[in-house]
Amino acid sequence: RCIVMPTSFYLVYSIGVFVLLFFLLSGFYLDEDVIDQFKDNDQFSLQRNHYDFSVDSVPTKPSPTLVPPPHKLNPKPAEKRKGDIFDSCQLVDHEPWDEELKSFLNVHFNPLDKCNKTFKPLTQLIEGVLDLTFGAALEGGYKCEGRCLVHITDYRYHGTPWESLPLMPDCDVVEARCRRNGSTDVMYEYMHTQIKPIKTNHTKNAKPKGVDKKTPLKPSVYIVLFDSVADTQSIRSFPKTVAYMQKRFNATRIRHMNKVGDNSRPNGYAFLMGEIAYTINKEIFGVPDLRGARTYEQSCNTALDGDDRSVFARYSKAGYRTMVAEDWARGVFNYPKCVGYNHKPVDHYMRPFHLRLEEKVSPLLLKESMGTHGCREPHMDLMEYMTKFIGAYPDDPKFGFIWMSVLSHDDPNLIFHADDYVHKFYEKNAEEFDNSFVFFMGDHGLRFGRQRNTAAGRREVNNPMMHMIVPKSIRKDFQPRLDANSHELVTMFDLHATFLDIVDFQPKVNFTGHNFTHIPASTEGSSLLRSLNPSLPRNCRSLPIPFDYCPCEFATKPVKDSFTAWKMANYVVELMNKELNSFNLSDCSSLAVDKKPDVVEFTPIEDTNLYKIEFIAKPGRGRFEALFRAHDPSNITSYSLASPYFNRLNAYGHDGDCITRAPQKPFCYCKSNLNRKPIHEVKKG
């Protein structure tokens, strides 16, 4: 901090006033190349805009705008120092029931408490036949019909002509409706699913070439994902399920699985494709950034059909029966308006089910009967679909994947009541799961809300849950390695490597591979079934983890220099406004800093020169954080941005609905909202 000696005060003050007047008269200056394209829908990225700006540490009222000098610094990445704090990683196993969180939790909340428990479906789909239930048939007086909903693309389905019941639909997704006899008004609508078995000899590739005939078929693989559920949160929210998995299957809790991007998209791309969706900034660590083979626009605007890196493609090619279902049509490969797949990527694709439910013209009766009014929740539909998939192919290796967002994404209190249902799901399929690989996981932790603003919430957001079951026949052999890896820092890329190891590499050695092996299609990952890559220390410098999401424990302390904090925050806000202007997003309000920002320094400061700022912008009360680096640790009045990533910490809901560009939505507050109180409803991510 700068201490101004009394003898030099007036000289310094006069020079400061002169410099300030010069820049005010010269006008605010910001190079056009400051702004790079944004790389995430909920996390925006600015190119390395290393402006050197100095402020006097004498406490004064902060200026309303930042005025950087008309020149730009381009410092080299941080040099690796002897004893650098980033050379190691201290991981801590935290208490699930953290005291900070208890006031936010309501373990007794159940959204089904007030549902219509008298509601009974009039139709049923059993053993391939759609017909009235016994009760409805006994009551009489109904005229019912059904139709198939067939996948065309990720955004379109085809509804076949309506036919009277009984009916044997040749599809997985079936819609039913009924009228009273003599009436033209539809009084009942419902959706059913089944697994219509594929009759082709799909398992001819299920045994790898060069392996003796006694080698069994490849074990099945199931992924059960709940969006936004963290590791320690899973112990709180699914206590019965987790305890059952550990007792019945000796499931391994992977304690330090770490996200590689802010929301679902970059993490989904990592573990399903082995692809870096957005540049992973490593400048803070003094090493090159990690960049994907495609830009955001390329991955979003190009269909994923035929991409051999996908685990869907790998398992299909290997002879597995395959199934995928998400309970939100704008899923991991589609949000916000990305192409996704033009053709079914798997044998059984539940997508028409949710396209129908979510379309604007979808009948209200249908939404009510399939929702809490009918005592239904979306995760039930997906888990039932997976259970039917398991039963449809008893002798074939299967790959099943369900991604559930609705239950867990918005409110952690919505999950507690579902523990019984999820537990029964594992009980029902216990025999199958006991002989399969099962991954009970999240994609990241809770990203929004009051809980996110606690120390525990900041830890959990980077640490998704991961509980892993290994087939009983090989469980004893792999348990020591899994136990060891469960305490290491691992990423979603390691999970992708594990999936490829199971389908392509372990079968060739009859599941006896325990030593690290390089998996070409998963260059950033190491299989969790093997020793981890010995050439990569398990820290955030070596692994594909941005500093923003690094779980390693680093010491920090508050910075009390409020004037510097205001300058940093104003600087970031000016960049936000510049970005909005560069895309002519005139429907968005100009932003300003609201209330005093908070700044902490990473200690020992001489090893990092790093500071983290957290501030609130108005209008809209968006909460953001950014990283800065001091150019001289002995004089903290000169800074530059240390990372091009800025995280929004709270929900933005409908604040930015006046624009279609997803990357700018987190910091766009529509002018049309100025007369209303911000309501932060959480969106997908």
Image (cartoon, rainbow, N blue to C red):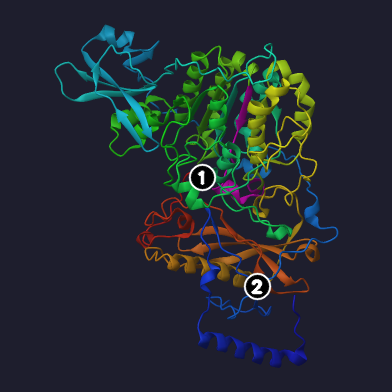
Give the camera-side residue of 456 and 41.
41
Q: Check the picture and name the quadrant holding the N terminus.
A: bottom right
SS of the residue under disc 2: helix
**Above or below — where is 419 with respect to 58?**
above
Give the camera-side residue of 420 and 323.
323
Left or right: 412 with respect to 486? left
- Residue 563: % across, % down: 64, 74
- Residue 311: % across, % down: 57, 32
Disc on res. 674: none
Left or right: 633 with respect to 152? right
Number of marks: 2
The extreme right residue here reads 82
- Is 157 part of what is drawn in magenta? no
Residue linked to disc 2: 564
Segment tinted magenta in the rendering:
437-458
Give the camera-side residue of 223 and 552.
223
Dividing the picture into quadrants, the one containing residue 625 is bottom right
- Residue 559: % across, % down: 71, 66
Tell me, yes or no, whether the two marked residues, 2 and 1, touch with CB atoms within 8 Å: no
Q: Is residue 73 visible?
A: yes
User: Which residue occupies 41% across, 52% down?
Assistant: 654
- Is 450 part of what is drawn in magenta? yes
Residue linked to disc 1: 685
Left or right: 676 with respect to 281? left
Spatial CA distance of label 2 from label 1 is 33 Å
